[in-house]
Image (spheres, rainbow, N blue to C red):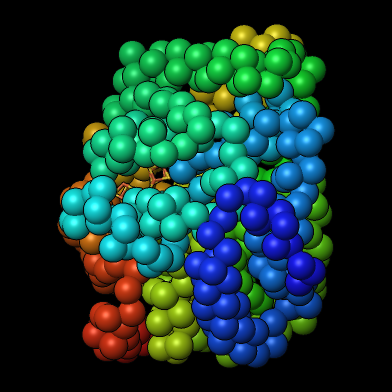
């Protein structure tokens, strides 16, 4: 990586802590990803992205800022990238997946807060996230209670925190609320950028984001093959990079990867032997660099063939209809698209378990591992009913609850291995 010290300094990063973080990350990446056997050639692009995730990509974002484009950060897949692109903004995902500076985070947050929220605060207080520091606006969405209340504390720490309210049910009134919130968000984006959302700019933005989603949907479908042409770890990485990369380059790279994988499928070649136990992971999102559980699964003689998660199919499986001619009509399509998202903050939320079943069938999975972060009430609460419903349908399910530390890795590995054994005997 080139020397980006001046850029990091100008963003206000704490260089010493940032160096320490990058070195831990770099080592973890080599150990976890580069040591995998028979990886697709197309993963080289993603290796490069990861090696430059705080370098070249940030340089591009800083250049975009200098050209007057606004950088809009968010923590949730309910914040429509289409609207950001429609004012020529740059959308970046800010969810944090590493245990960094939790002591600092716990000076502001209760200890019993999920790791994802603590990590976001740890990164902010430790000044190590160049994405967050480059943001002109950070969008905080009212989803779970943890995030909702944490944004009240985050507000004074960032330049411009914009709160987006979100519904918690799937009623018609709830849908109207979502539309109203997206309308207000358009006004906010127009104010900060000085640009108008037009029918033309919105249509183009919808097409860009749809193309990105179609590429990852294509990748998701290829994973139905046995032998698995790509590891779950690599596929997760692609889904994580989705939130950071330039959309055009990302789409192009995923499609190239898919061309290669389709060829692998044709030649019956894969990363794990044919007949390897196949699992779906369902639950809380795994933000980069949260690779702990997938690594444990894939080092226990199983392969992950799908993620029912916001960093996975829950975040990408719906496209936005491209039919309308006016901003209003297109906004309706955007609302229709986002209102489908079956996050556990909704009550009731039956479509989620229905989709896990569908994924299990389509991807020929042997079982489901339900992943919840400790203190994440929505997903932990939902995990019981999800497990019973899946087991009732003959789908073996393992529920795990964990955090970002490595303390429980041994215990989790034992449980995962026992579950994989159970699946083999099916
Ligand atoms: S749409 S899943 S990205 S809210 S893990 S912070 S839920 S306590 S992340 Fe999410 Fe949007 Fe829903 Fe998806 Fe709260 Fe749970 Fe923590 Fe979570």
User: At 66% from the left edge and 67% from the top edge, which residue is drawn?
Assistant: 50
Residue 305 visible in rendering: no
Quadrant housing the N terminus: bottom right
Viewer-proximal residue among 20 and 41? 20
Count of numbered labels shown in the rendering: 0
Tell me where residue 344 sits by quadrant: top left
User: At 33% from the left edge and 13% from the top edge, which residue is drawn?
Assistant: 173
Q: Position of residue 410 (x, y in %)?
A: 29, 88
Tell me where residue 54 sits by quadrant: bottom right
In the image, is residue 113 above or below residue 44? above
Residue 291 visible in rendering: yes
Viewer-proximal residue among 354 and 23? 23
Left or right side of 33 for 286: left
Left or right side of 168 for 45: right
In the image, is residue 329 above or below residue 352? above
Viewer-proximal residue among 366 and 119? 119
Q: Position of residue 414 (x, y in %)?
A: 27, 88
User: At 64% from the left edge and 16% from the top edge, which residue is drawn?
Assistant: 190
User: At 31% from the left edge and 33% from the top edge, which residue is drawn?
Assistant: 152
Tell me where residue 2 sits by quadrant: bottom right
Q: Position of residue 333 (x, y in %)?
A: 59, 22
Quadrant housing the C terminus: bottom left
In the image, is residue 235 above or below residue 197? below
């Amino acid at each position: 990586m080139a020397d980006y010290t001046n850029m990091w300094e100008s963003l206000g990063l704490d260089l010493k802590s940032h160096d320490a973080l990058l070195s831990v990350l770099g080592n973890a990446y080599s150990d976890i990803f580069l040591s995998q056997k028979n990886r697709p050639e197309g993963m080289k692009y993603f290796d490069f992205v990861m090696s430059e995730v705080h370098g070249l990509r940030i340089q591009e974002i800083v250049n975009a800022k200098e050209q007057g484009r606004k950088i809009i950060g968010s923590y949730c897949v309910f914040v429509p990238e289409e609207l950001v692109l429609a004012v020529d903004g740059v959308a970046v995902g800010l969810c944090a997946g590493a245990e960094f500076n939790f002591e600092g985070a716990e000076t502001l947050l209760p200890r019993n807060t999920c790791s994802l929220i603590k990590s976001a605060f740890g990164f902010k207080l430790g000044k190590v996230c160049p994405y967050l520091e480059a943001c002109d606006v950070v969008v905080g969405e009212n989803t779970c209670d943890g995030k909702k209340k944490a944004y009240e504390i985050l507000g004074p720490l960032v330049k411009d925190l914009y709160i987006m309210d979100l519904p918690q049910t799937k009623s018609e009134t709830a849908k109207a609320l979502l539309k109203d919130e997206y309308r207000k968000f358009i006004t906010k984006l127009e104010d900060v950028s000085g640009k108008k959302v037009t029918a033309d700019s919105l249509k183009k933005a919808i097409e860009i984001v749809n193309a990105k989603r179609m590429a990852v949907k294509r990748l998701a479908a290829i994973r139905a093959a046995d032998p698995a042409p790509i590891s779950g770890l690599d596929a997760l990485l692609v889904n994580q990079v989705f939130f950071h990369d330039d959309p055009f380059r990302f789409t192009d790279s995923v499609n190239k990867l898919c061309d290669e994988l389709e060829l692998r499928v044709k030649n019956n070649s894969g990363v794990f032997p044919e007949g390897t136990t196949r699992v779906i992971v369902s639950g809380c999102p795994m933000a980069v660099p949260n690779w702990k559980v997938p690594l444990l699964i894939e080092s226990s003689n199983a392969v992950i063939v799908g993620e029912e998660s916001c960093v996975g199919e829950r975040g990408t499986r719906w496209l936005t209809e491209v039919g309308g001619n006016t901003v209003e009509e297109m906004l309706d399509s955007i609302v229709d698209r986002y209102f489908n998202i079956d996050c556990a903050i909704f009550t009731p939320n039956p479509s989620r378990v229905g989709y896990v079943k569908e994924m299990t069938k389509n991807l020929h999975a042997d079982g489901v591992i339900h992943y919840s972060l400790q203190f994440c009430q929505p997903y932990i609460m939902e995990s019981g009913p999800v497990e019973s419903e899946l087991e009732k349908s003959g789908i073996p399910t393992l529920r795990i609850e964990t955090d970002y530390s490595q303390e429980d890795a041994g215990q989790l590995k034992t449980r995962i291995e026992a579950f994989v054994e159970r699946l083999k005997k099916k």
